[in-house]
Image: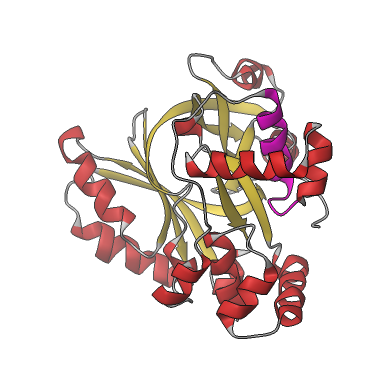
């Protein structure tokens, strides 16, 4: 039931609970109770996100090595920034991983400040060139609870895809509000943007139709039996990069696969039930790909921030 609810929200983050209940074959009150329990116990949250590839923004993957006494405070500080996402503490707790967004052609301001920050020993930044898995494409572990017919019933009814227009100031306010809570009511969104509920609903659907906006679900991976997470930094010859990346994107153990600049050119996030399962994945599945020349495994110790803004607003 819970996994079906999460998948339903992954398909349509703003689906009415009554429609989710009908598809799952339970009462609306049951869906609401399970939703609230998942929010409390597993950190469930729906967030609306602008697709960087459609919005003229560049994502930078930042690796920061810091002294043990400084790393946690620095990670918390980075998590509070509006231009960061996926802030994680990795390795032995002395490395911070974060994604920083900036307009295309603009060097992220935070990268100018980091080298002068006390406690930091090294900083490296890698441009995210292409996403093979992640972003609008959910981790496969979340997409196996519902039947194909149930999934079709949950697909949102959106207008025909139209040419994407530049984002307005009201659009930025709308997306920012949804980054706190993707299920914010139309009434609250209208107040935030100084518009009407009908106008907000039309614009939100238009942004979704042209793929400028998508909804993601944040939930503790432990709810799926995941106890071991790791970032995998790989070096692959450019001639084989597409083949390897597309192969990895089909692996159930991976939640993200992206091409980057830097000494390694392929990055993936692995989600496994146990360290033994991670070892088996590395040796048997990745080991079967001879095109991977080098592999660095960085265990994830703690996630300070996921895709949305740090502090959630109350759900309507």
> Residue placed farthest to the bottom in the image?
26
Q: Position of residue 143 (x, y in %)?
A: 46, 68
Residue 173 is one of the magenta-drawn residues: yes
Q: Please give the range of residues in magenta.
A: 169-184
Q: Nearer the viewer, residue 137 or 107?
A: 137
Q: Position of residue 78 (x, y in %)?
A: 69, 34
Q: Which part of the image, by quadrant, shows the N terminus?
A: bottom right
Quarter of the rendering containing residue 204: top right
Q: Say how many tags the image has.
A: 0
> In the visual, does 88 lie left or right of 118?
left
> In the visual, does 1 lie left or right of 132?
right
Quarter of the rendering containing residue 194: top right
Q: Nearer the viewer, residue 86 or 182?
A: 182
Q: Main secondary structure of the magenta part?
A: helix
Reply above or below: 42 against 105: below
Residue 88 is one of the magenta-drawn residues: no
Reply above or below: 97 against 134: above
Q: How is the image coloured?
A: secondary structure
**Could you tell me which residue is drawn at 69 percent across and 24 percent down?**
169
- Work out whether residue 249 can be spotted: yes
**Could you tell me which residue is drawn at 71 percent across and 54 percent down?**
183
Q: Nearer the viewer, residue 257 or 202?
A: 202
Q: Position of residue 53 (x, y in %)?
A: 45, 32
**Could you tell me which residue is drawn at 23 percent across and 48 percent down?**
244
> In the visual, does 308 lie left or right of 225?
right
Quarter of the rendering containing residue 10: bottom right
Reply above or below: 197 against 74: below
Q: Position of residue 150 (x, y in %)?
A: 47, 75
- Work out whether residue 94 can be spotted: no
Q: Which part of the image, by quadrant, shows the C terminus?
A: bottom right
**Could you tell me which residue is drawn at 54 percent across and 15 percent down?**
107
> In the visual, does 92 lie left or right of 192?
left
């Amino acid at each position: 039931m819970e996994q079906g609810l999460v998948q339903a929200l992954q398909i349509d983050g703003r689906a009415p609970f009554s429609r989710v209940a009908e598809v799952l074959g339970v009462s609306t009150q049951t869906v609401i109770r399970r939703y609230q329990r998942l929010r409390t116990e597993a950190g469930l949250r729906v967030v609306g996100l602008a697709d960087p590839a459609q919005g003229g923004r560049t994502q930078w993957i930042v690796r920061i090595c810091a002294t043990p006494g400084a790393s946690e405070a620095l990670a918390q500080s980075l998590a509070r920034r509006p231009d960061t996402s996926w802030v994680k503490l990795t390795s032995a707790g002395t490395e911070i991983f974060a994604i920083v967004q900036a307009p295309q052609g603009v060097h992220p301001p935070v990268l100018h400040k980091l080298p002068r920050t006390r406690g930091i020993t090294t900083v490296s930044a890698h441009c995210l060139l292409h996403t093979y898995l992640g972003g609008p494409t959910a981790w496969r572990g979340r997409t196996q609870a519902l039947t194909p017919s149930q999934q079709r019933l949950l697909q949102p009814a959106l207008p025909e895809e139209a040419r994407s227009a530049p984002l307005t100031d009201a659009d930025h306010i709308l997306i920012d509000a949804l980054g706190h809570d993707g299920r914010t009511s139309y009434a609250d969104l209208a107040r935030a943007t100084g518009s009407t509920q009908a106008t907000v609903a039309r614009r939100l659907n238009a942004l979704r139709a042209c793929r400028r906006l998508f909804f993601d679900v944040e939930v503790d991976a432990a709810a799926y039996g995941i106890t071991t997470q790791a970032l995998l930094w790989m070096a692959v010859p450019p001639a084989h990069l597409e083949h390897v990346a597309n192969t990895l994107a089909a692996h159930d153990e991976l939640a993200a696969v992206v091409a980057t600049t830097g000494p390694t050119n392929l990055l993936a996030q692995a989600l496994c039930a146990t360290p033994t399962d991670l070892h088996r994945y590395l040796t048997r599945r990745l080991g079967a790909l001879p095109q991977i020349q080098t592999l660095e495994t960085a265990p994830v110790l703690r996630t300070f921030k996921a895709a949305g803004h740090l502090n959630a607003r109350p759900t309507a």
